[in-house]
């Protein structure tokens, strides 16, 4: 009698990088396109629009990278501090730490004897890893990497911002606003669809969310540029 493993796909492990990638690309696309469409409503010359778009792309990417680096560095410092504290407690009070781990497993539904047996086995294997994972919530897959996060955020921002910059380069000035609006909404639709598929979530709600807020952003900046801009 043959046995085959059945392993169903799960998508929650993608949450960290998926959230960061989608957020960065959406931010790059919406912020750059909104800035350009607001500027275009004031009817500046083509050179001004192009310089503004490139500046928005570079400045936004650097800002995203810096913000993510600082944020994830703070998270990494906190994780390191917690691990040092936990290692110290394991050295000073191993019995109390074992009892604490046992209670954690009891709280997850194991009977006291089995919880103690599991706690002992995991403590003998790697006590610090067991407490880091089950007491603090730190795992190898979730541990913070500031440089990786900064690079990924900058790249994601650029991948979204490049679309409106290219539209600004190749579109006639008279057609720039509708071209920006159409390309931005199309890009947001692709991002919403891709994020839903990669995350195993329903596509329609993701599309509605991203297109609705994208349209609001574009309309808002267009109105500001129209009413406050200096007409040529």
Image: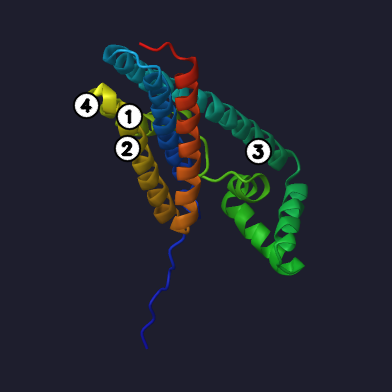
Residue pointed to by mark 4: 170
Q: CA distance from mark 1 to mark 2?
A: 7 Å
Q: Would you say 65 lies left or right of 160 here?
A: right
* Residue 200 appears in view: no
Q: Which mark is residue 87?
A: 3
User: Which badge, 3 or 4, comes first in the chain's sequence?
Assistant: 3
Q: Residues within 10 Å of mark 4 (few under 14, many from 20)?
A: few
Under circle 4, the secondary element is: helix
User: Which badge, 1 or 2, comes first in the chain's sequence?
Assistant: 1
Discs 1, 2 touching: Cβ within 8 Å: yes
Q: Position of residue 98 (x, y in %)?
A: 72, 52
Residue at left offset 34%, top offset 20%: 53
Q: CA distance from mark 1 to mark 4?
A: 10 Å
User: Which badge, 1 or 4, comes first in the chain's sequence?
Assistant: 1
User: Which badge, 1 or 3, comes first in the chain's sequence?
Assistant: 3
Residue pointed to by mark 1: 164
Discs 2, 4 touching: Cβ within 8 Å: no
Q: Quadrant of residue 161?
A: top left
Residue at left offset 50%, top offset 39%: 213
User: Which badge, 3 or 2, comes first in the chain's sequence?
Assistant: 3
Q: Would you say 18 lies left or right of 163 here?
A: right
Q: Nearer the viewer, residue 30 or 14?
A: 30
Residue at left offset 42%, top offset 47%: 192
Q: Nearer the viewer, residue 129 or 228?
A: 228
- The quadrant of the image that shows the C terminus is top left
- The quadrant of the image that shows the N terminus is bottom left
Under circle 2, the secondary element is: helix
Residue at left offset 63%, top offset 53%: 123
């Amino acid at each position: 009698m043959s046995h085959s493993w059945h392993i169903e796909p799960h998508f929650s492990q993608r949450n960290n990088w998926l959230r960061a990638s989608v957020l960065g690309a959406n931010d790059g696309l919406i912020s750059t396109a909104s800035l350009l469409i607001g500027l275009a409503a004031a009817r500046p010359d083509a050179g001004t629009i192009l310089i503004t778009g490139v500046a928005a792309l570079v400045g936004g990417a650097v800002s995203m990278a810096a913000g993510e680096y600082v944020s994830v560095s703070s998270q990494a410092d906190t994780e390191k501090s917690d691990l040092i504290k936990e290692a110290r407690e394991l050295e000073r009070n191993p019995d109390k730490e074992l009892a604490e781990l046992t209670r954690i497993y009891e709280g997850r539904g194991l009977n006291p004897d089995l919880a103690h047996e599991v706690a002992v086995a995991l403590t003998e294997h790697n006590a610090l890893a067991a407490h880091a994972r089950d007491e603090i919530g730190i795992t190898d897959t979730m541990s913070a990497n500031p440089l990786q996060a900064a690079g990924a955020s900058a790249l994601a921002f650029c991948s979204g911002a490049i679309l409106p910059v290219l539209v600004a380069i190749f579109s006639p000035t008279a057609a720039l606003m509708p071209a920006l609006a159409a390309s931005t909404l199309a890009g947001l639709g692709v991002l919403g669809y891709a994020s839903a598929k990669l995350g195993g979530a329903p596509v329609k709600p993701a599309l509605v969310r991203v297109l609705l807020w994208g349209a609001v952003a574009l309309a808002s900046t267009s109105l500001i540029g129209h009413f406050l801009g200096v007409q040529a």
